[in-house]
Image (cartoon, grey):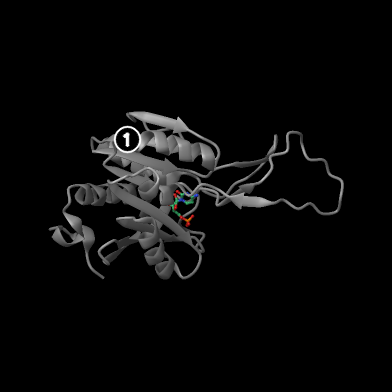
Amino acid sequence: MRLLLTAGPTREAIDPVRFLTNRSSGKMGYAIAEAAVGRGHEVILVSGPVNLEPPSGLVDFASVESAREMFEAVRDRIGECDAAIFCAAVADYRPVKIHEEKIKKSDDSLTLELEKTEDILGSARSIFGFHGVLVGFAAETHNLEEFAWAKLEKKGCDLLVANDVSRRDIGFDSDENEVRLFFHNGRRKTMPANSKAAIGEKLVEIIEALVKGAGADASPSDLFADR
Ligand code: C5P
């Protein structure tokens, strides 16, 4: 199958030397990309700035900085894909104005006005017209399950992968993760804590089954064990 992945954080410029970003390392997305290449798939990786080597064997790699650049890179590549997996921690807001020169220290306080960035996942169905298997990620510190179901529905996802970022031992920048899966048909599954490589491998298996149309109900294995 042909698969598009977004990974890593975005950077939203304030001035030539400063930006807004977040703690995403890109490790989860890169692990999924690596697993997918290893299983013989055509993988397109659209990545924000990370300290990781892109896996070898990708069919396309786009290195981007801002949410707007990521939006455009996805828009231009998603067309022929069977599945799209949005792992990136895209900034939700960016400065309205990018100062052309470095902001000088003067007043005691400084106010930055922010505006919403493009919602890339939310554009997949409505703007890009994507009909393949759509997988979103959610990083929440509270009310994880409630937000996960709501996001799944709102963004038209087939699968929502949620992790609890209030825990410091897993998730952001860690080599380990523990995720909970929420399927469009109402099923859910918890994947026990494991390396991001192992979770990546399992997620690719599940996405393969979704692309084949097996759906959560039809799967013969324990891929979609009920909870
Ligand atoms: O709303 P939240 O940021 O938690 O949504 C997370 C999911 O949405 C992830 O799959 C992320 O890649 C995607 N997303 C996006 N564009 C944004 C914000 C989030 O694609 N501007």
**Occupied quadrant, residue 33:** top left
Q: Residue at x 15, y 57 (%)?
A: 219
Residue 55 vs 208, above or below: the answer is: above
**Can residue 49 be seen by looking at this rendering?**
no
Q: Amino acid at mark 1?
A: Val
Instruction: Label 1: state its secondary structure.
Output: strand
**Can residue 226 be seen by looking at this rendering?**
yes
Q: Position of residue 97 (x, y in %)?
A: 69, 42
Relative to the observer, which residue lies in front, 112 or 165? 112
Q: Position of residue 130 (x, y in %)?
A: 32, 44
Residue 203 vs 149, above or below: the answer is: above
**Occupied quadrant, residue 37:** top left
Q: Residues within 10 Å of mark 1 (few under 14, many from 20)?
A: many
The quarter of the rendered structure image containing the N terminus is: top left
Residue 32 vs 159, above or below: the answer is: above
The quarter of the rendered structure image containing the C terminus is: bottom left
Relative to the observer, which residue lies in front, 112 or 41? 112
Q: Position of residue 166 (x, y in %)?
A: 51, 64
Q: Position of residue 106 (x, y in %)?
A: 87, 46
Residue wearing tag 1:
43
Residue 103 vs 59, above or below: the answer is: below
Relative to the observer, which residue lies in front, 208 or 195? 208
Q: Residue at x 69, y 51 (%)?
A: 113
Q: Residue at x 33, y 48 (%)?
A: 200
Is 91 positioned to the left or the right of 35 in the image?
Answer: right
Q: Residue at x 21, y 57 (%)?
A: 223
